[in-house]
Image: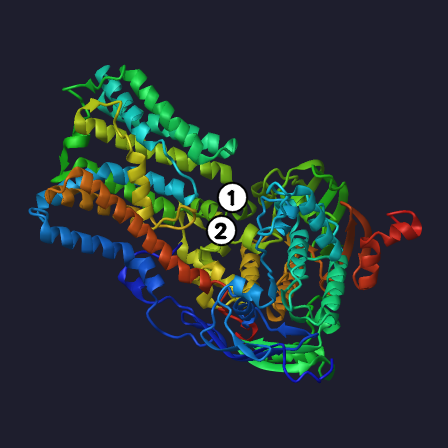
Amino acid sequence: MTMLQSQPLLRLEAVTKNFGPTQALNAVDFDLRAGEVHALMGENGAGKSTLMKILAGNVQRDAGRILLDGEEIDVRSPADAAAHGIAVIHQEFNAVPAMTVAENLALGQEPRNRYGMLDRSAMLASARRKLARIGADIDPRRELGELSVGLQQMVEIARVVSERARILVLDEPTAALSRAEALHLYDVIEEMRAAGSGLIYISHRMEEVWQLADRVTVFRDGAFIGTREKDRISPPDVVRMMVGRPLDDLYHHRRRSAGDIVLDVSGLCGADGTGPVSFQVRAGEVVCLAGLIGAGRTEVARLVFGADKPSGGTVTVRGKPATATSCGRAMAAGIGMVPEDRKKQALFLDHSVEDNIAISSLHTHVRSGVLRRERIRGAVEGQMHRLRLRRSALRLPAGALSGGNQQKAVLARWLMRRCDVLILDEPTRGVDVGARSEIYEAIDELAAAGTAILVISSDLPEAIGISDRILVMRAGRIVHELLSHHATEEDVMFHATGMAAHAHGDDND
Amino acid sequence: MTDHSLGPRDKAAPERGGGPAPKPGFDFATWWDRVGILVVLVVLTALMAAVAPNFATVGNLLNIARSISINAILAAGMTFVILTAGIDLSVGSIVAVSGIVAVLTATSGMPSPVAVILGVLAGAAAGLVNGLLIAYLSLAAFIVTLGTMTFLRGLGYTMTDGQPVVSNVLNFRDIGNGYLAGIPVPVVIMAVVYLIAWFTLERTRYGKHVYAVGGNGEAARLAGINVRRVTTSVYAIAGACAGLAGVIFAARVVSAQPTAGTGYELDAIAAVVLGGTSLMGGRGRLIGTLIGSVILGVLSTGLILMNVQFFTQLLIKGVVIILAVAIDSLKRRPLRLRRPTPSGTVTAQQN
């Protein structure tokens, strides 16, 4: 970008924010020019989200100044933010799941006809326009809560983008998106930049930051580390700024010869039209289910784990029947699952980290009906140490942890339980670099110990980097199998998008 | 769930190590979470002792203990239900029905243990029906128990033709009126119920599952917990507690009253909520429920001793309940802000 603008669109000076005893932001500076994408990076808990909340008017700063066009402003509420032309795409959406997509997109500005009644057709038309703008293929009449997390995120993006803000803050907008959806979003971002908006882009994904951003600012532990022109630095520089040390080789995965078949899935179908799918995972093997959002990867995982009832097919673990009708049965057969959405599906946010980790292993620590609490604590601490979760987190509510540490706590639960088969659904979504590397390490260790591992990942470098084999899914079925050390991202996308089917006229080429 | 008990050692601020620059200081929210309700009780008791004549006598305190025992036992069962984010409106009606079952059994010539056990079982059975309907048909707890509340009240009237069944020779009357080592029997029963309930919630796998189901039902299911079975069981427990309370009530008034326990469900819920248990489930302590019951009992007795009119008593009780819940909600507010805060970042650097 040019350096001509003398006055930035937005400038933050020495902004400070404390939450109780914790200093979330310590006198940070930040500036945003018109017509630039400014990436804000840092590990979870670095203060990015707090900064975003201050801009959104959800949280008030304790000290410092916010200047818009050189004039000091106060953002006391989300309405204030909107009045100043600041819009925010949140990682957690502000939407009503029980209402339709169209109703959500019209929330607060529902069109009326001349009788003062809700104009449904106008509302639908406007929703279709907003969705088309970001290239989202979603029926606006569907209930929002029925959509997958990725599609819900697209709706949120459609809503915020339609507000035509001068300043747009995006917090991990692609975390739940498929590649194709992300590409549409990049187009929208490009368009808004060209129109002179300033965009603050918060992300953990280095590739997309490098593709989109003009400048990069790094926060660490609530402090401003630095702002750099993207062209003058490299990704490793940014990682070093983020973690305060160089990070070599993110993906831990040692090749090893796989053992016997542990998980054998045959003709498994779901009531929602998923499947039939058949595949095996061997002891010590890491198999990745790849595909676009909605390809049926999560559905397959849930069927194997008994979270949804299969309508047909069988699952065996080490040769023993394990077709599950409940999660408890699946677990008894040796299967564990780290679900897609840790906050909604895995964690008890008000409960202590200790209880969260121990909850699935209590039966092994009972004597005459009484919990053996010292033994439980010992076992929990062992797993926390293994995943480098600090010991002092033991009694904190899980909701007080950063995303990366929350994910480690969920993983610790299944490490403590010791499964023969562990399914991990998007294990590093919204997780910072440091924690990611530790999660990969744990997966690798588990595989080394003979666990059969099934990973679902939308992050293609990750999917390739940590697995032995990749099963590509499309429209509820496995359409292709790749060996990871031969695979490229393009290979996976080629089959996931169905281009292979067009090229060869056959899914199973 | 562990180590949040009320006790002096918990007054210290919890560890929040690892975050950037933690500032030591007084954290009202945390402090109130630990001891707030106990402070309310102490202040209230001191106030009553100062103004109400004859309040601080052994006799009166034992009287208070006896008078709260029925509500406290109901509230113990209600705590299980509310911890799973449920509600049970039928416990008041169960008090009547189980009392009737016990008295009718006794008057038919059965020995007293049989009468007592049948009374408690009647309550447990009613609770089991509540639980099955709620867990397996996925009906709303509020509606199901509203229905059984009405049904069971009707059943009570039907069994007694709407008349009290008075029995001067009731063989289990000591359960309501007797003393054990100078302590009223209902108080002894209450203590036993709380010991068992506390132990179940804090020291067994089942207790952890109750908290988990209320904390996040979907997560509990995906963690392998049989959510339906846990949900069914808590209503059965609440029913059994109500059955026991009904037997004590019948013994106390030496008769079976079809109108017994009217409105008791609300007092039980008030005690649970006063004690800090969240109606959203997953958060709360049994000891808080006990203190909540005692607060309600101290308040009523104190106001009676002060010759405050019954109408005015209700006004004051209502204000106290809302005030306690309001303080509870205010203290939660800073907690919500604290959530997104960085605690423990850069874990990789620590080791």
Position of B319 with respect to A464 (left or right) is: left
Chain of the residue under label 1:
B
Mark yes or no: residue A318 visible: no
Under circle 1, the secondary element is loop
Q: Residue at x 33, y 41 (%)?
A: B269
| Contact check, label 2 and label 1, Cβ < 8 Å | yes
Nearest the eye: A44 or A113: A113
Chain under callout 2: A
Q: Position of residue A266 (x, y in %)?
A: 75, 41
Q: Secondary structure at mark 2?
A: loop
Image quadrant in which you'd find residue B39: bottom left
In which quadrant is the N terminus of chain A drawn? bottom right
Tell me, yes or no, whether dots 2 and 1 are on the same chain. Answer: no
Residue situated furthest front in the rendering: A114
- Spatial CA span between label 2 and label 1: 9 Å
- Residue type at mark 1 is Ile
From the viewer's side, name the closer residue of B111 and A168: A168
Residue A359's disc is: 2
| Residue B139 located left or right of residue A260 | left
The answer, for residue B282, to whether it is visible in the render is yes
Q: Where is residue B228 drawn, in percent x and y?
A: 50, 37
Residue B346: % across, % down: 55, 73
Q: Position of residue A129 (x, y in %)?
A: 73, 52
Type of the residue with mark 2: Ile
User: Is residue A187 left or right of A246 when viewed as pictured?
Assistant: right
Q: Which residue is mark 1?
A: B225
Residue found at x 49% / y 51%: A359
Which residue is at the front of the view, B118 or A428? A428
Q: Residue furthest right?
A: A504
Q: Is residue B211 above or below residue A183?
A: above
